[in-house]
Amino acid sequence: MTDQSAFAAWGAAAELEEGLALTPKFDADGLITAVATDASSGDVLMVAHMNAQALQKTIATGEAWYFSRSRRALWKKGETSGHTQRVVEMRIDCDQDAVWIKVEQAVAACHTGRRSCFYRTVPMGKSGAAKLEFRDERVFDPKAAYRK
Amino acid sequence: MTDQSAFAAWGAAAELEEGLALTPKFDADGLITAVATDASSGDVLMVAHMNAQALQKTIATGEAWYFSRSRRALWKKGETSGHTQRVVEMRIDCDQDAVWIKVEQAVAACHTGRRSCFYRTVPMGKSGAAKLEFRDERVFDPKAAYRK
């Protein structure tokens, strides 16, 4: 689906896990999972996906790029809202199918107006019908931010 | 693929994002993404997947359960190694296709012996051929832990 030739093909488990080569294991849709955390608070801000081009652009520019599965499009975080993410550090996991980026987040990560997309808790010890609890307030007005 | 009837079907975006009902948006394989962070340090320990049953069991027991895509099996974290995860808090994201769990991790999360699966950094500003750098030492011997 996407050009993955910028990265070497992934090899045996030992090489994936203990090697020094970045060989991302893109899935059938050409994507890996990307988790962005706030470099200061450590909070998880969002979970999204990167294709090879998004990963390349993120590494090259130091700003977070993703691939939108719903829009089928490369996407620079904050391109509309201005709520960009400067990448302080990028890590890759053992089997190289997920990256963790620690970012300096401008304003807020979530399109709903909250700092993090994870603004609701799931009460533990309850059944699936448990009520979610809101934890984070809006820090911007999404109607205004996406009006442009 | 799995029984999702324990959770209500997901509705319109407004309800997903602003509602109080837990309506996880399982993908075509019946999975949502789960990110586990260390409740003390805030470090991302691992990224994995949960099906409806894993999510239910995690909520009910307060210990992390996942679904292994490679083994096609429900899996209690630490069932072989003893390296269990006690869930301190669970959060769900705006579109309800990812959960974030803050956990108390016994010993280490990664099967390679490191505390976190994200033990290598990707140098920024380089091309895809950049060399990874190891950051975390092993805290247990994987050969011994999985010998049982």
Image (cartoon, coloured by chain):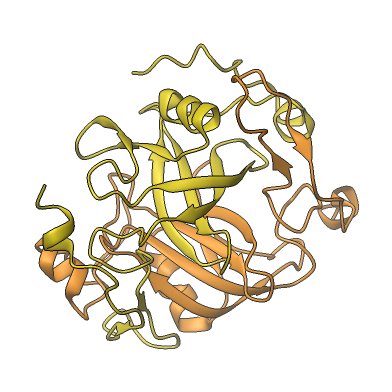
Chain colours: A orange, B yellow
Residue reaching furthest top? B5
Residue A18, x across and y down, in percent: 18, 74
* Image-quadrant location for residue B95: top right
Q: Is residue B22 above or below residue A111?
A: above
Q: Is residue A24 above or below residue B87?
A: below
Q: Residue at 46%, 27% (x, y): give it.
A: B57
**Image side of residue B56 versus residue B51, left or right:** right
Q: Quadrant of the C terminus of chain A?
A: bottom right
Is any atom of residue A73 visible in this view? no
* Image-quadrant location for residue A106: bottom right
Q: Nearer the viewer, residue B40 or A122?
A: B40
Is any atom of residue A15 visible in this view? yes
Q: Residue at 24%, 58% (x, y): give it.
A: B111
Q: Residue at 44%, 48% (x, y): give it.
A: B85
**Image side of residue B131 versus residue B118, left or right:** left
Q: Is residue A81 above or below residue B77?
A: below
Q: Residue at 61%, 59% (x, y): give it.
A: A44
**Image side of residue A9 versus residue A41, left or right:** left
